[in-house]
Amino acid sequence: MKTSLLYRSPTQIGIAAHRCFQSTVARNHSEISTLFRPSKFHPAGDLLRAVDLENSNLSLQRLTLASNSIRAPNWTVNAATITYCIKGTLLVSILDTNNVFAAFNVEPGQMFSVASGSIYYIENVGADPAELITCFRHPQPQEFSFWAAMGAMTPAVLGNTFSESASAFSKIHFDTKPQYIIQRAKGSGSDISSTAGLPDPHKLDIEAQNPPIDLPYGSAKLARAQFWPALREVNLSMYSLRVAASGMREAHWHPETTEMGYVASGQARMSILSPDGDVVTYYLQQGDCYVVPVAYPHQIEDLGEGGFNFLVFFDQATPEDIGYRKTGSAFSRVMPAVLGVEPGAEPAFPSTPIDPLIVKKVNPTDPVK
């Protein structure tokens, strides 16, 4: 079977079916027909997911919320999540175990984490639309909404729970269908506690981070466990990777780690090698997402003039990689034999004590085919 590791959302969100770009990747994969879906379209926003991905422990969700709309209270049964805010001003409220409640503001460039089973909601408290990208640590996330959970109980049970008369709940037309996006009830308050702007362990301002990797031709800001301890519980991480036209994400692979990325801006080309020798090359643009299975070699380079920004998610709290540059340096003794040339005829493999992650382009970009 042939499959694609690239997923592209339609121009008009929530209307058209999502397209899959088929290619000759690993013939032992199953064909993927479920892409950015299902589309939970609502006048107050939209929720799209890329799920059921072969050889992936991850899935992605793109959520948009109009002003005064709410991602309804819900919890995920089988997956922790981390979320990156692309635009908007939001209030996130989370109830964890042991009666621990948190409510905090989230703005563009900030992230938040939610443990599996913890209930939360997201409210757009700004005047402009909001957009968020969420990574689930499961290829098929399952969830309950609080609305459906209440609908499963009788008015008497709900009354006993909240020390109310059953009649207070019998007039509400509950059902057990999931609730996705709702609008703030007319007349309800929009005041936000002054403590919502304080630091919270669920939250990371990743774009305010001084980049641990900062080069003239690219940078990476890292949501890893050493910078965000909450990731140890959810076992996820994310790199905000920026590469200029003069740079390239070095060819590399991630032992024991699945990579799933979202193109926040720019245009790029990615090549991936599968174990049976197939090489697939993708041309990525804003709004695309992709998957790289565990330990598959791959690289990314800019095809535009302004560079690109990828949100790169991993299914480990401290993802690691092995790069081609460090490998060539470490194995320089045997590289003539590997390349089938006489000693001294091989290319120079510069000494590389620490792999750079991003390298400078010293050659013209290969033509786009």
Image (tube, helix red, strand yellow):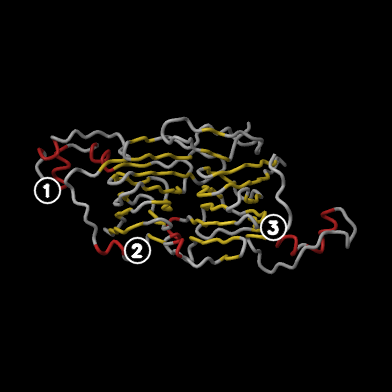
Relative to 216, is 173 on the left or the right?
left
Three-letter amino acid code at the position of disc 2: Asp
Q: Which residue is mark 1?
A: 163
**Crowd tier of the residue under label 1, counting other residues whose Cα lies within 10 Å: few below 14, some 14–19, many 20 or above:** few
Quarter of the image where the N terminus is located: top right
Provide the secondary structure element on which disc 3 rests.
Answer: loop
Three-letter amino acid code at the position of disc 3: Lys
Contact, CB < 8 Å: mark 3 with mark 2?
A: no
Residue in the foreground of this view, choosing between 225 and 218: 218
Q: Is residue 12 above or below residue 291?
A: above
Q: Which residue is mark 2?
A: 200
Provide the secondary structure element on which disc 1 rests.
Answer: loop
Q: Nearer the viewer, mark 3 or mark 1?
A: 3
Residue drawn at point x = 21 percent, y = 38 percent: 153
Relative to 102, is 349 on the left or the right?
right
Three-letter amino acid code at the position of disc 1: Ser
**Crowd tier of the residue under label 3, counting other residues whose Cα lies within 10 Å: few below 14, some 14–19, many 20 or above:** some
Residue in the foreground of this view, choosing between 285 and 146: 285
Horizontal and vertical percent for residue 43?
32, 36
Horizontal and vertical percent for residue 245?
63, 54
Rounded to the nearest whole Å, what is the CA distance between mark 1 and mark 2?
32 Å
Residue drawn at point x = 33 percent, y = 41 percent: 144
Residue 365 appears in the picture as rendered: yes
**Crowd tier of the residue under label 2, counting other residues whose Cα lies within 10 Å: few below 14, some 14–19, many 20 or above:** some
Rounded to the nearest whole Å, what is the CA distance between mark 3 and mark 1?
68 Å
Question: Which numbered disc, 3 or 2, marks the residue that appears first in the sequence?
Answer: 2
Q: Which residue is mark 3?
A: 361
Question: Which numbered disc, 1 or 2, marks the residue that appears first in the sequence?
Answer: 1
Residue drawn at point x = 13 percent, y = 35 percent: 171
